Amino acid sequence: MKIKLTILSAFLLSVSGLQAQTDNGVMRLEEFAYPVKRNNLNIPNVNGFQVLKCDFHMHTVFTDGHVWPNVRVQEAWREGLDAISFTEHMEYNPHKDDVKVDHNRSHDLAVNLAKENNIVLVKGTEVTRQTPPGHFNALFIEDANTLVSDNDPKMDQEAIDRVYQQKAFIFWNHPGWQVNKIPGSYEWIDFVEKQYKDKKLHGIEVVNGLGFHKKALDWALDRNLTIIGNTDIHNLIANSYDIEREGVHRTMTLVMAKDRSAAGIREALDVGRTVAWSSNYLFGKEENVRDLMNACVSVSPAYFEKTNAKTKEVTKYYEVKNNSDLYFELELKTGKGTKKLVLYPESTQILTADAGQSVLSYDVVSTYIRSDKHLTFDINLK
Amino acid sequence: MKIKLTILSAFLLSVSGLQAQTDNGVMRLEEFAYPVKRNNLNIPNVNGFQVLKCDFHMHTVFTDGHVWPNVRVQEAWREGLDAISFTEHMEYNPHKDDVKVDHNRSHDLAVNLAKENNIVLVKGTEVTRQTPPGHFNALFIEDANTLVSDNDPKMDQEAIDRVYQQKAFIFWNHPGWQVNKIPGSYEWIDFVEKQYKDKKLHGIEVVNGLGFHKKALDWALDRNLTIIGNTDIHNLIANSYDIEREGVHRTMTLVMAKDRSAAGIREALDVGRTVAWSSNYLFGKEENVRDLMNACVSVSPAYFEKTNAKTKEVTKYYEVKNNSDLYFELELKTGKGTKKLVLYPESTQILTADAGQSVLSYDVVSTYIRSDKHLTFDINLK
Amino acid sequence: MKIKLTILSAFLLSVSGLQAQTDNGVMRLEEFAYPVKRNNLNIPNVNGFQVLKCDFHMHTVFTDGHVWPNVRVQEAWREGLDAISFTEHMEYNPHKDDVKVDHNRSHDLAVNLAKENNIVLVKGTEVTRQTPPGHFNALFIEDANTLVSDNDPKMDQEAIDRVYQQKAFIFWNHPGWQVNKIPGSYEWIDFVEKQYKDKKLHGIEVVNGLGFHKKALDWALDRNLTIIGNTDIHNLIANSYDIEREGVHRTMTLVMAKDRSAAGIREALDVGRTVAWSSNYLFGKEENVRDLMNACVSVSPAYFEKTNAKTKEVTKYYEVKNNSDLYFELELKTGKGTKKLVLYPESTQILTADAGQSVLSYDVVSTYIRSDKHLTFDINLK
Amino acid sequence: MKIKLTILSAFLLSVSGLQAQTDNGVMRLEEFAYPVKRNNLNIPNVNGFQVLKCDFHMHTVFTDGHVWPNVRVQEAWREGLDAISFTEHMEYNPHKDDVKVDHNRSHDLAVNLAKENNIVLVKGTEVTRQTPPGHFNALFIEDANTLVSDNDPKMDQEAIDRVYQQKAFIFWNHPGWQVNKIPGSYEWIDFVEKQYKDKKLHGIEVVNGLGFHKKALDWALDRNLTIIGNTDIHNLIANSYDIEREGVHRTMTLVMAKDRSAAGIREALDVGRTVAWSSNYLFGKEENVRDLMNACVSVSPAYFEKTNAKTKEVTKYYEVKNNSDLYFELELKTGKGTKKLVLYPESTQILTADAGQSVLSYDVVSTYIRSDKHLTFDINLK
């Protein structure tokens, strides 16, 4: 997935090129250069839907982030993402002495670069109210400069209403982020209930960075809200995630979309066809997680049988192949066979089972289909 | 491709497990353990053929190698190979004071392990004559103990005849290996010509380890012999190849086969449907290399157009995606567009072209379809 | 520590060299080659003693290992070890149908290679009795072929006596290895007590591979036996340890020796100047672990002071530098300062402390000076 | 050098911590987190001088860079640098519609963070005149807002004079950067000669990023100007340098200083005690490069002798140890011994020599002490 290779023509250039370099007196020492490429983040289509890799929560110097907007597009391109959204704070501008406040500006500056890189740039913002209720992201807005930037709690409803009027997709961010500091802040409070009832709340960010908000997952599942995972990155992705290590990726939302477009994403978000992915874990509605896993994992027919010389018991051998960059860790629940299967990204394991078995049932401990429940995955043996 | 991840349940085990560990007084420190898995070496099917990854030349302690036969199967499994062959020297047994000479033994010892790991183990041997003519590998033999082990040059023909009688697939190994030591050894000599004429020579090893035998490639192409690449490994693969570095693989023969079986391999070898792969390079018949590349590389329709404000010239943007673990490096020959494209394994690059272009023609400098010729690859723009 | 770099002269060779390569028709594709080098495993001297990296337990094809003896020397050289010992089983020869039984043979075959590589090769053996009492390693023996190879329990004492007569350094291997299978096998049984009383037991292997035998550590500490850690490797080091990942090393015994020689090692073993190192953990007598850590970790004088604008409290800043390839993880016990310090290999952390503090006291949770006790490490602030 | 390890206490926390996590409903998934640490960049002291790692050329969003100033301090800290300097363009402010122009601002914003991280932040600027003469960096300035920002060529001398009046250390940047675009721009022109004569030019940047300006090296050597290497980074270091690969570092100036302070750096720059380091290469005055290499490389006494059975010739064995993170590649010039020695960072090689040899003389092809000359390094054998 992430490959570090010297470019062959660097060798060739060092042959023919060295002459030219001698001519012009400047020699390139390319060996330590970072290879410019977009890493394929492989996930097969799911029921005909493309699986788009999306991060809907991030910041730039235009609010409290530490990079110019172009860096976010570059990070996304390199890491194989399909869509991102700048969600600058409406109510918080710590750089305002140096950077002119314009809530649309980071988006506008990056629009063309995103197009050139084939990255879908969703116009968004972060409605940054005091906690509780805390922060909400609004995607697919039209104009951030007409929204509420006053952080008086009396304006909370108005702040939501304004993004709602722009037909935004609205989700509640990191509901538990102040759990240790503000009592009562990690609860399904009346304000949130009201937005939900009024159809002004459409999703919940159950993973923010590397924090899994367990109660938030259950709230989303119980109310059929769309499940979201984002980085909320302020500094560099590479300073938060060990992304040069193989298999490591940023937190993101996997969106099963009809096509790779803003409209495709919106449709999928509206109907909740998402799975959040963070570290080695997947979080989502049971059906979505199962469909995703079914698309990624395949089991071969038995390719070998071994008979125990003493007991005459027959063991059959199967290959279980993970065709994706996702990670699945399985523990046997019922049946006689391999007790533990670790399906690392883009790899294969051998599964053995007693000859009589037709199904082995596993708990996929790297998935959460509820705060206290893993996906059950049945492997049918042929 | 190669992922190093801590197993999640190690965490879980450290919860529930620590109790047990306290009970039995032995604690596992798994963090530094090598992850046991088979890496998928991704290459899409080519014209309906599976692309099998094969290494047909290697040694164990049973001649002059440094490992027990099981190690070779383990290496192959981990690295994603489909088939290997032990090709112990018939005429050279430096360990004979310690290891009993039995030319079938390494194969026999590994047969069951290979079956359990779904690795096709092709029975082979290395007919190790003095140079010239040097060494020949014979695959699909029946019994190595009935072959010639006497290294008298007078027996050269007999040695070939015996493997031929076993219906072996025979190829000439590393033709240039003694070029600097034995004058005349790197030539298409009469003895070789005779085998070729008599249909007793079926292929040539044009890459041995990290050495590309350029003249041998042309000999193979001119005579329609099958093109082979192997490691000829004696010590550990990991001591010769930097295989833990991403994108690095051992030298091998890519066999485009009807199925993953010994018969499938034999058929493909017989008709020459192979490409040798070493370092970042591919070596083969033009048609085979082109078909392989066509299977791996896809070009999107134009997704963006940019008009130069001054010149009004329009540039179109395309994604060129490498869906494989192969590496392709392209340099523009004709047309107006991106001059250089490096398609790292499992990655994507942006290609730009003038709006009027319908085709860009590239030299694929990481391929050799002759000792002095790269594949030409046309990219059709939509 | 482990560096993967293309050799510069490969570039230069590709200039001048390509001509020569064209001449002889063989081209080298060096890019994927494993770099041949010995990695420095950095640990500063401790109280004037060199810290030798030793692995005193391993096997080759001459008993139940999977490699020829030279591989063990190569592995040791590359990984920066100073000393190894082949400890073939006296009583167990599963390869005997293929490999002639000679208990000295693996040592003898490797002696010269070890000398050329400046690796101290300690002559040893594994006295492989049934469990209990289980296995004992004997180092510095003279002739393994005169020892006991009959595995009748009645010969247990004779087996020990014979290695003792050769003035061996004797330690008990992996005492808990059969804890789950053989009740009573992980106890300080009478036979062991007798050897200890008779001065025929000099050390205990408290770490074997990635297994930490907790009770064994306490037994060793209570009786002032030398603490040992080994791999007991049978297959490849690279198949058990993820050694290409930075910071990863095999399990070993750190021997604080007067010089890098067999005699230096023997003296240090005899007096117990050792620490076992496995994964990120150190195991040993308190004094040894503390001396080792003191040699590796240094704390700068305060380089900065910051005054809290509100509280007027002053915080001082210090650098804590780990000058070694060891790993130390510290948790604050007493004092006001940084609560957690992770001293990764060859790295530095910032420590902050209240201005009034003169000492911060830490638990080094990556060390065990008893099965239930970490080293306490005081940082004196200047 | 760069270690990626899971923190042990993450395991421990997952035991005791999971309860707390259950309590507050937020679970941390730390496995993919980037480890926060400062990598030691090991270079031994040279003749009693500390070798400080310095990058004196970089940009932030305050001119045409892409990051907030704090990111530059973080990058420096992580990579083991000792000193950096923001050198914003005086005459070029492409972000001025969004970011208020203040030439001191990036420095001022980072001062405290640099102090906390023990990074020496040298106040600097880039005098960005049209080419030729091109750009000059001025270090140790007092106030950038009183300098020349008008880019009229008539002001070139005034621009230099103003930084000179602030007692700046002035060096010419990347002299060949426009060689292919502006004829005559890569010459020692009169303007530069005048500054040099008037002692207003003190150094030359002979390496900028991964470009080695060969003629510039000779100019510096001939006039005893200080030799400088910098990144001139605008985007992320990690987007230009493959820094997560072992052994890779950014381009920098190694300053042999009396202490780790601004004053120490200034003194060393004034007297020219520097070596530029880029990719695997060192560039500098012969004496400085030699002293640096002598500090890093040590040769053991002979530890083994081997006598050729036939010729009776005796070969002696030595260890050549590289105690640094630098890279040295040696090719034998005179003497009978190992022809090629690659001293990878923190590693050791075996050198063999005929018994009669007392000295082997090597070309260190990874060093440039002139555009066409490598350092000669004599190894004395004992």
Image (spheres, coloured by chain):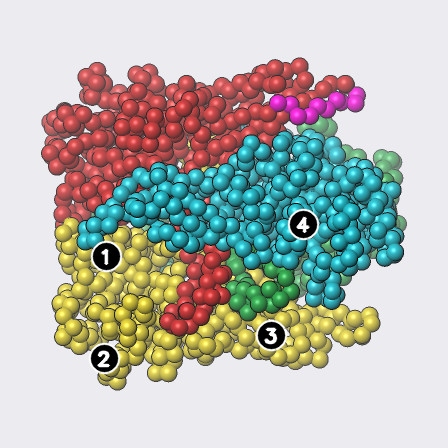
Chain colours: A green, B yellow, C red, D cyan
The magenta-colored residue range is C301-310
The residue wearing badge 3 is B332
Circle 3 sits in a helix, a strand or a loop, which is it?
strand
The residue wearing badge 2 is B191
Q: Residue furthest bottom?
A: B197
Question: How far across and down, in percent of the image, does residue B193 sit?
Answer: 26, 82
Question: How far across and down, in percent of the image, does residue B334 sit?
Answer: 62, 79
The residue wearing badge 1 is B64
Circle number at residue C30 = none
Q: Chain of mark 1?
A: B
Under mark 1, the amino acid is: Asp
Q: Chain of mark 2?
A: B
The residue wearing badge 4 is D223
Which circle, 2 or 1, is nearer the viewer? 2
Principal SS element in the magenta part? loop
In the visual, does D87 lie left or right of C103? right
